[in-house]
Image (cartoon, rainbow, N blue to C red):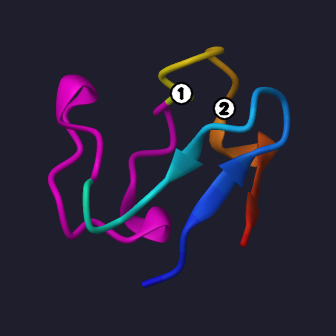
Amino acid sequence: MEKYKCMVCGYEYDPAEGDLDHGVKPGTAFADVPEDWQCPICGVGKDQFEKL
């Protein structure tokens, strides 16, 4: 699975780790992350992420 990077703050979403603090389980592909999910660092939406 591909990693995605927030273009605003540089946070990297790693599917292997997910984002448990915000309800995204490990193993969740970025495409399957809920549309209302926000960057846990700066709060922007998924549209501000770019595939690495």
Q: Picture coordinates of residue 50 (x, y %)?
A: 78, 60
Q: Which of the numbered marks, if any, corresponds to residue 13?
A: none
Contact between marks 1 and 2 (CB within 8 A): the answer is yes
**Residue 38: numbered disc:** 1
Give left or right: position of 15 versus 47.
left
Q: Nearer the viewer, residue 12 or 28?
A: 12
Span highlighted in magenta in the image: 18-37
Q: Secondary structure at mark 1?
A: loop
Say whether disc 1 or disc 2 marks the residue closer to the N-terminus.
1
Residue 2 percent location from the top left of the image: 53, 79
What separation in Å lies between label 1 and label 2 (alpha carbons)?
Answer: 5 Å
Q: Which numbered circle lies on residue 45?
A: 2
Q: In this view of the protein, which residue sits in the foreground, 41 or 25?
A: 41
Position of residue 8 measured from the top left corner of the image (x, y, whole percent)? 84, 29
18 or 37, nearer to the observer:
18
**Image point 35% across, 65% down: which residue?**
15
The amino acid marked with disc number 1 is Gln
